[in-house]
Amino acid sequence: MSNTENKIPYKIYLSENEIPKQWYNLRADMKNKPAPLLNPGTGKPLTAEEMSGIFCEELVAQELDDTTPYIDIPQEIRDFYKMYRPAPLVRAYCLEKALDTPAKIYYKFEGNNTSGSHKLNSAIAQAYYAKKQGLKGVTTETGAGQWGTALSMACAYLGLDLKVYMVKVSYEQKPFRREVMRTYGADVTPSPSTTTEVGRKILAEHPGTTGSLGCAISEAVEVATTNEGYRYVLGSVLNQVLLHQSVIGLETKAALDKYGVEPDMIIGCAGGGSNLGGLIAPFMGEKLRGEKDYRIIAVEPASCPSFTRGKFAYDFCDTGMICPLAKMYTLGSGFIPSANHAGGLRFHGMSSTLSQLYDDGLMEAVAVEQTEVFEAAEKFARIEGILPAPESSHAIKVAMDEALKCKETGEEKTIVFGLTGTGYFDMVAYEKFNDGKMTDYIPTDEELEESFKHLPKVPGQE
């Protein structure tokens, strides 16, 4: 290790005063803006008035704002952030040594809170605006449970009621995360359920289904729109969520700047886009403005490959087809992925913002299989001492692959990846991996083509 490298600590911490005071709105710097959400009934862009029946008013304003580059973070939210932020940026010296690579590897660790993930960054913001509006409570969906756990913490802190629809397979696989939500006062229902009209419809059409985020979204939206004093909040995909998660990237860049480090590539797991969008935000902003260039890589599961095998088209965000239409990379709202263990990466579509950036060639995407992801997770846990969430392990896998490529070429690339959270509630998955019972599933072209046939008919869309 050189003297220069000795100056960079294992963990780079910012001070409490360096927590970002503003969120960064990546869309303000995009030449090609994300396509607007459409009203499925009229086919026209969704208005603020129409959206306010589903979402909180202030969140609607943030969702529709694609021109304001920086938005102030309310002091109440910043005060909450201080309980677990700033999050450390870690130099993975041990991993570099184990891989025998000249690459320099950093990861932004977002698991240092009870929810175990980055989701709390947006949960507290959305709960705050709901409380400010005078609402009784909110509804939501959750896949692996990180979002539901984070939102239950935020709602408990602010005294809001919370109803969570949890993807059935995760409800069964991750009982302890479910119980954390209940401990914080949330009402948790496995989805699809018989408690909603859309849930009963999905169960009739797909008997015995293990569920999907699209199913759970449909149920949560139905409950929000049929109960006075409630609104729906979402943990990923939407522009407002990427806005709140920009604290990840802003802190990452500030920590790197302290030591004059410039990354060559930024890698993040991709399900709906919240972590990836937040991590890359300031770096992509520099790229869009022509100030710097970075290689940005989205990593998704081969079982739910929205970017790498999906279509860039308008589609419903939910399986029940009651939500607005979003233009995104999608596998079709009726696509229900296999019961993989990366619950947070089981959404059929992708953020409209990230989809536009990907379509414009500003970022790459790669799909990886489940068993190789867990092999990387186990290796990382043994070397770096953190048991990573299955979602995060997708980024770990590709970061390790890129570091090994550097070993072959001798290039000293600097790699930054997002460690979205811990995997301590995912031990059923680790048990299956350790027992050799974990399998890989990749949808066939025929399955995807059948799903694509049901994309909604939108003028100008083939």
Image: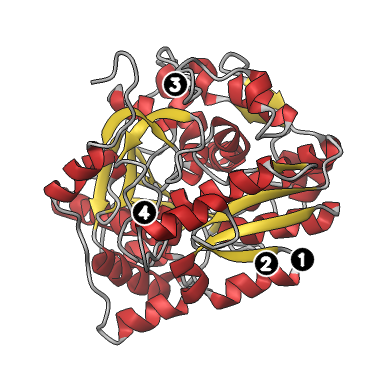
Amino acid type, mark 4: Ala
Residue that label 4 marks: 395
Name the residue rendered at 51%, 55% in the picture.
Answer: 199
Amino acid type, mark 3: Pro
Residue that label 2 marks: 181
Residue 268: x %, y % from top left: 40, 47
Q: Give the label on residue 218, or none.
A: none
Residue 154: x %, y % from top left: 75, 54
Which element type, helix, strand or loop, lies under badge 3? loop
Mark nearer the N terminus (1 vs 4): 1
Residue 299 visible within the image? yes
Residue that label 3 marks: 34
**Which residue is at the front of the view, 124 or 173?**
173
Graded by Cα atoms within 10 Å as few (under 14), some (14 to 19) or many (20 or more), the crowding at tag 1 reads: some
Q: Which is closer to the viewer, label 1 or label 4?
A: 1
The answer for how far apart the CA atoms under marks 2 and 1 are is 7 Å
Left or right of 390? Residue 305 is left
Amino acid type, mark 1: Gly
Residue 1 visible within the image? no
Graded by Cα atoms within 10 Å as few (under 14), some (14 to 19) or many (20 or more), the crowding at tag 4 reads: many
Graded by Cα atoms within 10 Å as few (under 14), some (14 to 19) or many (20 or more), the crowding at tag 3 reads: many
**Which residue is at the front of the view, 191 or 77?**
191
The answer for how far apart the CA atoms under marks 3 and 2 are is 33 Å
Residue that label 1 marks: 185
Which element type, helix, strand or loop, lies under badge 4? helix
